[in-house]
Amino acid sequence: MKKWTRDIEINAPIEQVWKFLDGSVENMQQIMPQVVEQKPVKITEEVVGSVYRQKYREGKRTEEYDIETLEYLNETNEKKLKVVSHLLKCLKLQLFMN
């Protein structure tokens, strides 16, 4: 299996960046405009294990896939979010913010 990773350092307050990943769809669309909808499928109290169904527009085509939260921490001085998306049942994407 091929693996691709990329690190990006963002020079901004963590709360400013966090709102784009752990907030509303409207906020998320500011950095990922192809996301057109996100609805909860399964919500857990501890956030880890929660699943959202996301619609993503690529040209004229709209794909639908599930996003599962694998790690979540929302403390004043530390934020962590790791999600996996299962796109077309063949591609596994992970986002990790620390």
Image: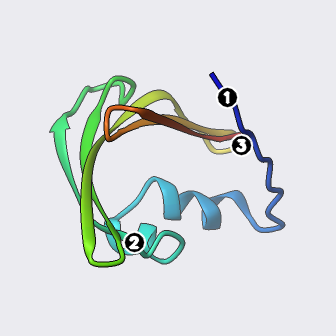
Q: Verify CB contact (< 8 Å) between mark 2 and mark 1.
A: no
Q: Residue at x 35, y 77 (%)?
A: 59
Q: Secondary structure at mark 1?
A: loop
Q: Is residue 91 above or below residue 15?
A: above
Residue 61 drawn at (x, y percent):
26, 69
Alpha carbons under labels 2 and 3: distance apart: 30 Å
Foreground mark, 1 or 3?
Answer: 1
On screen, residue 42 above or below 8? above
At 63% from the left and 63% from the top, the residue drawn is: 17
Can you identify the residue that label 2 sits on?
Answer: 34
Which residue position is annotated with label 3?
Answer: 77
Amino acid type, residue under disc 2 in the picture: Gln
Of label 2 and label 3, which has the lower sequence position?
A: 2
> At 71% from the left edge and 40% from the top edge, which residue is drawn?
98
Question: Which x, y percent locates residue 55?
Answer: 25, 59
The location of residue 56, given as percent across then percent down, is 32, 62
Asked if residue 53 lies left or right of residue 27, the reply is: left
- Three-letter amino acid code at the position of disc 1: Lys
Name the one closer to the observer, 24 or 5.
5
Mark 1 is surrounded, within 10 Å at the Cα level, by few (under 14), some (14 to 19) or many (20 or more) other residues, namely: few
Q: Of 26 and 58, which appears nearest the observer?
A: 58
Residue labelled with disc 1? 2
Asked where in the image residue 2 lies, by quadrant, the reply is top right
The Cα–Cα distance between marks 1 and 3, rounded to whole angstroms, is: 34 Å
For label 2, the crowd category at 10 Å Cα-Cα, with few meaning under 14, some 14 to 19 and many 20 or more, is some
| Sooner in the amino-acid sequence: mark 2 or mark 1 | 1
Q: Secondary structure at mark 2?
A: loop
Task: Please tell me whether mark 2 or mark 3 is closer to you in this view.
Answer: 2
